[in-house]
Amino acid sequence: MENTTILRDLTQLVTNKKWAELRAALSPLEAVDIAERLMELWDTRQIAPDSLALIFRILPKELAAEVFSEMDSDLAQVLVQAFSDSELRDIMSELYMDDAVDIIEEMPANAVKRILQAVEPDTRKTINQLLNYPDDSAGSIMTTEYVSLRPHMTVSDAFDRIRRTGPDKETVYTCYVLDNSRRLIGIVTVKDLLLAPDRCTVADIMESHVISANTLTDREEVAHTLSRYAFLALPIVDGENRLVGIVTVDDAMDVLQEETTEDLEKMSAITPSERPYTRTGVMSLFMSRIPWLMLLMLSATFTGMIITSFEDALAAQVALTAFIPMLMSTAGNSGSQSSVTVLRSMSLGELEFRDIFKVLLKELRVSLLCGAVLAVVNFGKMYLVDVLLLHNTALTVPVMAVVCLTLAATVIFAKLVGCTLPMLAKKIGLDPAVMASPFITTIVDTVTLLVYFRFASAILNI
Amino acid sequence: MENTTILRDLTQLVTNKKWAELRAALSPLEAVDIAERLMELWDTRQIAPDSLALIFRILPKELAAEVFSEMDSDLAQVLVQAFSDSELRDIMSELYMDDAVDIIEEMPANAVKRILQAVEPDTRKTINQLLNYPDDSAGSIMTTEYVSLRPHMTVSDAFDRIRRTGPDKETVYTCYVLDNSRRLIGIVTVKDLLLAPDRCTVADIMESHVISANTLTDREEVAHTLSRYAFLALPIVDGENRLVGIVTVDDAMDVLQEETTEDLEKMSAITPSERPYTRTGVMSLFMSRIPWLMLLMLSATFTGMIITSFEDALAAQVALTAFIPMLMSTAGNSGSQSSVTVLRSMSLGELEFRDIFKVLLKELRVSLLCGAVLAVVNFGKMYLVDVLLLHNTALTVPVMAVVCLTLAATVIFAKLVGCTLPMLAKKIGLDPAVMASPFITTIVDTVTLLVYFRFASAILNI
């Protein structure tokens, strides 16, 4: 309650220059809430860059850095220009490395240069290293700030070290035990340390069966591993098992959410964007949607050409036209049921390419059942509704047979294509989510029409 | 590497009765890995119930409970029958309350009775309380095992208490400060405690600005709050702000993944199930898919009836038929772009019902752009490809005008319906995800045909 009041009246407090009051009011708030309100004020042009910089100046250092790390890249850029050199250095030195890198990645070259000049040489080196990891890799989301322990330390040595080095670390609750060559030989949690007698050594209580990931592991896979084992952080090692960073659970959660949003967007024929819908402009929305709509519209040329080439057949049996939408949509729905199921199962790490034959067999059996049931129900519906109720005399038994056979055949086809395409796409390095929906529909539509007219000419002799 | 070998040879180790070896080999493994392998062996009938019970008997108690909590409900049921009373009591007393409740919720009455008889009276009472919370509420996923502190405690008192009560708690890293009436007055992290001088009191260092949720808050909202603030746990309070439980980050992650899978399934016209695809049988898959396919197939009766009633018009202008699939699929794609975007934005908590007019205005502007561009491109494509290249003489300018006007109008309509329906659905208590895809397609298909034939009869006088 109180939160919303403070944030709502933010501009007024700034205008009235009530700095002490503002600092006291903002300090207990969460960084993300402050950041969101500032972005809202910025979007609606209610705050000027220098007022923004002022607010950052009065915030406690750590909070200021956290708020900064929650900013969208465009506002972060404005701030980088508005900050003095020393302010910029202060903020950057408070930031965790992974957040610093996230911000820098999105910035134009001149802003990046300003930031890298402002920070300490050591930080600059680390940032440059982290920037070099591929976009979707564990390296790109890890932080280099973790607590490391040595095996011979006693429990109280370990606590001393945590107390000394902890304040700057993103998490202190999982500590990493390294040998002389910085190779990861075990992990110890603060809970283990708290429950162990003081004279124990780290080696006595550490878990030496460590689950870790490589710097180049896909970030989604890292997030799934964290979630699977309910870890608070996952150690990231290089090729020689040397610890180079950790990925924390909050970042893993963000990754999962982002990847899900991306998959959903691709499946709905939208080019993914990083910005939330509420903060995306009309032109950006348009640009992310129009290419796919156009591509899919033009690919529908095939269905048009097929219908045109069977114009005479359709003129001879006008009743056939009425069932085209039903056939196409049923086949499309069947296909997307399979493709979405398989896609989700793949992104949850339950399915691998080697399972493809098992999946095909399962989908074949499901599709035979679905195809048969739908064909029978549709035959019944056509007979009861169209023939008996609506007296549609054009619907002879052969015509109904053509419709129902097409229905069964295309449902089976759609399910088999639907489950295969995402798996094949991933195998050959294409995006399974893009393949999952828009493309399958186009293929299924085309095949449905071809099958329909083939059955029609065979059974009705047209 | 070594993991997979042990798990692969599990049945052999059991057959050879190498208990000591088996215990040593399994102990360092993660519970979820063991559970998964056991379920695999069970599914493929490679292991008998008594061998399963044997494996549980040799596992360290805590690990056994964790493995049990990872089991699917059908296998958990088999185990409940195979365990002796004392084994069942041991396992249940090691389980965290939220895991115990999760398992019990899925069990048939006789198994539940057995479990409740086996546990201690206190545990039974807590379980019964937790079972009473609605399915999707915070209460249903919270655990009652947290560390509570009192404000007057010193830092070393607090550590003593954590050491004493910690072993049974799901997390010790966030501790909850309660007053005499168990009202939540602050939180303290172990990091705060570690970094504070020993003589400080809890009240000195606690954060009294606590973000919490109510027992009846939607579990998805709880998960989003945890993710938004990067918390390790969220306190759950009753109406009087008394602490009743906590939701930990690992459970929040599971909730987010489950809810996403459910939404995806609903959007693809599938009845959601809790089991992973790989462990779902053909009949269950069929049953989760066929009702929707049938419903959508039967609802396509409308499109069929519309086409039938315009048969004469179509016979007069056969060229019109060829564009029906393209018009329907373009409108459908436009609609699902909007509905999926809005739906995702709603489930990420970015959009509320009160934003509906802002959303409508934005989508209107996007759809005007999309509609206009698609109509123009399609006109060009028809002229260049169909008329000039394929010499389709039936495509007169008025016919092309009908197609392009329909295209623009239905793209706009589809986007507006697409963004409105999920928001309205949520407002009136229906499922936005179900409304998002299958139903919108049916509405859009029907309207597309009506608009098409209306334009055709107005412009072509048929």
Image (cartoon, coloured by chain):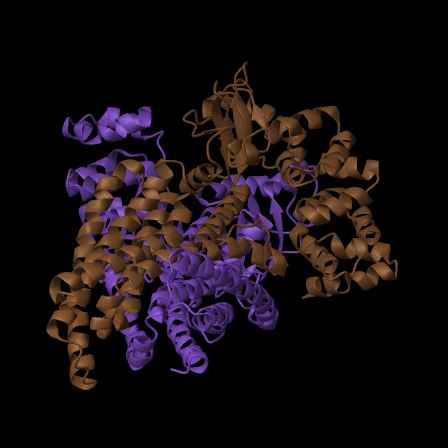
Chain colours: A purple, B brown
Asked whether residue B450 is in view, the answer is yes
Image quarter where the C terminus of chain A lies is: bottom left
In this view, the residue in front, B48 or A41, is B48
What count of labels does the image hold? 0
Eyeballing the image, is B282 above or below B359?
below
In this view, the residue in front, B340 or B20, is B340
Q: Position of residue B351 (x, y in %)?
A: 31, 41
Eyeballing the image, is A249 above or below B401?
above
Furthest residue in direction top, as rendered: B180
Q: Position of residue A111 (x, y in %)?
A: 22, 56
In this view, the residue in front, B50 or B21, is B50
Q: Residue at x 72, y 46 (%)?
A: B76
Task: Give the left or right position of residue B79, taking residue B416 as reference.
Answer: right
Q: Residue at x 42, y 48 (%)?
A: B434
Asked whether residue A244 is in view, the answer is no
Q: Position of residue B321 (x, y in %)?
A: 27, 71
Q: Position of residue A404 (x, y in %)?
A: 48, 68
Toward which corner of the image does residue A9 lie, by quadrant? top left
Eyeballing the image, is A137 above or below A34?
below
In this view, the residue in front, A133 or A90, is A133
Toward which corner of the image does residue A307 lie, by quadrant? bottom left
Furthest residue in direction right, as rendered: B17
Toward which corner of the image does residue B80 lie, by quadrant? top right
Image quarter where the N terminus of chain A lies is: top left
